Amino acid sequence: MWWRKQWSCIEESEMEIGKTKDREKWVDYVKVIACVLVVLGHFFQSMVKSTIIPDNDLYSWFNKTIYYFHVPLFFICSGYLYQKYSRIKNILDWKNNIIKKLIALGIPYFVFSIVTWILKTMFAGSVNDEMSGLAETLFKNPTAPYWYLYSLFFIFLITITYKNKTNKMLLIAFAIVLKAVVLLTGGVGIYAISTVMANEIWFVIGMCLTDIDMDKMNNRFVGMLLGIIFIVLSVVAYKQNITNGLVTFILGLLACVSVLWIMISCRRYNNRFMDYVAKYTMPIFLMHTLFAAPVRIVLMKMGLTNSIIQIVIGLAISFIGPICTAIVLEKTKYLEFVIYPNKVIKLLKRR
């Protein structure tokens, strides 16, 4: 069948990734850090909007600071893996890659965006944010955190892997121009275009990481020092209310370099906790709000508005709920399609 032949071509690059995945433990660890920060950001935003905790300087600084770099870390990791393990040599390779990404990103994007839209529409009086129409949410203005999958697909759509130094420099120049246009103009009115223009630079930075000799990044204290500098500068930026786009980008770049340097320098160490959480970053990313919001509402209905109780239970369910759900879906095999569609398609193909 034509689709079997098509899928066999798509699987070739995935097999290469599987063979070398263990050597990229630092990528998993960076994703864990980014995922935890995404969860914390959304969780404490909901706590403040629900007036369970006050909107004070500590919260405002933390919320502003993590948005400098937590999602850029995801784009960097995706760019690194794309350049290192994908082979986009011609239009056929590009087409196969887009089909794979459309399935891998599109299925969870549509499934969890629709679920979120339904829940927020049904319980509009109990949630923090109002939702627009379903079509607009899916195609025009994606909701958090799923906008990342939306943006990432369009980045794959316009970005090809580079073959030599000339290609690389052209790609870097392209990404810089896109970012400069966003910084100077604020982007365009179409979300898909604006978000690609803003985040292509992070993806390309990740691609360029494949050319770095990581053995020269063994000193974790350099990364820690950069992290301290970033924290100090982020406090200054918050106190001075600096919102300049270029400053924001530089701070984000500094934070990303710090995290990457620390994780790369620790890549030969094993951390069982990080290894375990790394297996479930995708489910946690997709489902943390779907567990945290209902639990928060139930606790409030029960009169349990104490901030400590809300934070402890809310954060616990934000991680435990998605992990348990992922384990159950994995045991059913085929229901795991909503999280890892390509994995299930390969299982069906072998039958």
Image (cartoon, grey):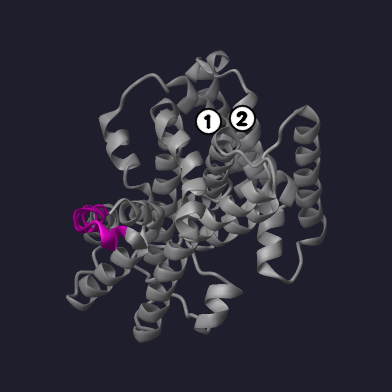
The one nearer the camera, 303 or 151, is: 151
Establish if 118 lies above or below 275: below
User: Would you say the residues marked 2 and 1 are in contact, meaning their CB atoms lie under 8 Å apart?
Assistant: yes
Query: SS for tag 2?
Result: helix
Specify which label sits upstream in the sequence, 2 or 1: 2
Residue position for label 2 = 209
Establish if 207 lies above or below 323: above
The verdict on residue 96 being magenta is no
- Give the residue at the far front of this rendering: 1
The answer to whether residue 97 shows anywhere in this view is yes
Q: In 3D space, how far apart are the residues under numbered discs 2 and 1 (Cα atoms)? A: 10 Å
Q: Quadrant of the C terminus?
A: bottom left
Residue position for label 1 = 260
Establish if 273 lies above or below 104: above
Residue 52 percent coordinates (x, y): 33, 67
Q: Residue at x 62, y 54 (%)?
A: 95
Q: Nearer the viewer, mark 2 or mark 1?
A: 2
The verdict on residue 334 being magenta is yes
Residue type at mark 2? Leu
In screen coordinates, is 254 left or right of 324?
right
Query: SS for tag 1?
Result: helix
Which mark, residue 207?
A: none
Q: Residue at x 58, y 57 (%)?
A: 153
The region drawn magenta spans 323-336
Dominant SS in magenta: helix
